[in-house]
Every structure is written in C-alpha cells, then in structure tokens.
Amino acid sequence: MQYIEVGHVESIFRYPVKSMRGEELEVAELGWHGLDGDRRLAFRLTDKSGGFPWLTAKKFPDLLLFAPERRDGAVEGKLPTHIRTPSGEKMPVFGEDLAAEVERLHGAPVQMMRLNHGAFDEANISVISFDTVREIGRLAGQSPDDSARTL
C-alpha cells in the first residue's frame, strides 16, 4: 500500500477546562470521547435551576484568560492541578479561592465540576491547516500571526 503525505501535525491543543485557554501537547490519546482529558472540567453556575448550567466564554469572555496548569510532578495527560488567573495567581482547580475569584469577576456563584467522560463538546476534533487559518484571516481582513496560534 502506498501512502501519500498530505501534511503533518504541527501542534495538538486540548482544552481541559471548558472555555479556558488550551494547552499544547506533545502527544495525545484519541478515543471515543475525543482527546483524553479534553473538556473534562467546567464551572457550573450554582444558581441555575434549569437550562444550560455551564459557565462559558460566551457568558463570561474573561474566562479565556484563565490558564490550566499542572504542578511539577503531575503526569502528562492528566488533568490540570491548578489554574493561573488573569492576574497571574495560581490556584488549585478544586479550591474555594478559585471559585470565589471567578464568582467575584463574573458576579454569580460557581462550582468546578469534573466529568469522567466529558460532556462539553468533547468528541469534536478539528484538523486545520495554517493555510486555512491564513485564508480565514484574509477573508476577515485580519493578519494571523504566530502568537495567535498559541491561544
């Protein structure tokens, strides 16, 4: 069988916390629920009695400024242990301080939730070439640069 190369994978990103910044991976396991560890955590709005319960960047755009991190010694591929806030402070993922900070900035009480198999757009995998990104930028009148690829 002959294979034809159509491209190469330059980077792999996953988003362990819904609507927070992604993290670049060296390798990733792909399974029934998408990338291992992708969208396994999310803030739940605790004052919602019905409807969509998750806090998203659509409701709170500053959530994109929070960055999941693993403390030294945490195993690659595992969920983040801490979240770096927009002010640079690092807080435990399930700590009361993080929930209080998001509540303070967003204005509504939240609780970090974990789902073992994900439930937040978890099975979608996007394979996008940089030529595609450039063309989208051209059509939108924007000029993508390398720093945009790390968000």
Image (cartoon, grey):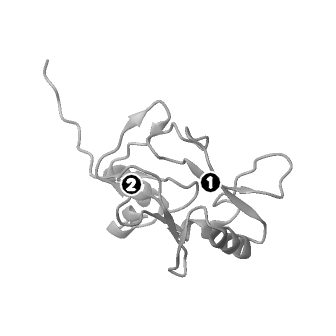
Secondary-structure class at tag 1: strand
Residue 18, position in %: x, y? 58, 54
* Image quarter in which the N terminus is found: top left
Corner quadrant of residue 85? bottom right
- The image's mark for residue 133 is 2
Q: Residue at x 17, y 30 (%)?
A: 4
- The image's mark for residue 146 is none
| 45 displayed left or right of 83 | right
Q: Which residue is mark 1?
A: 42
Q: Nearer the viewer, residue 114 or 140?
A: 114
What's the CA distance linking mark 2 and mark 1? Answer: 28 Å
Q: Residue at x 56, y 40 (%)?
A: 116
Q: Residue at x 13, y 22 (%)?
A: 2
Estimate how packed mark 2 is, as few (under 14), some (14 to 19) or many (20 or more) residues with alpha carbons within 10 Å. some
Residue 131, position in %: x, y? 32, 51
The vertical placement of 95 against 117, above or below, is below
- The residue lying furthest to the top in this view is 1
Q: Nearer the viewer, residue 24 or 150?
A: 24
**In the image, which is nearer the foreground, mark 2 or mark 1?**
1
Corner quadrant of residue 93? bottom right
| 114 displayed left or right of 136 | right
- The residue lying furthest to the front in this view is 73
The vertical placement of 65 against 21, above or below, is below
- The kind of residue on which mark 2 rests is Val
- The kind of residue on which mark 1 rests is Ala
Residue 17, position in %: x, y? 55, 55
The vertical placement of 21 against 49, above or below, is below
* Image quarter in which the C terminus is found: bottom left
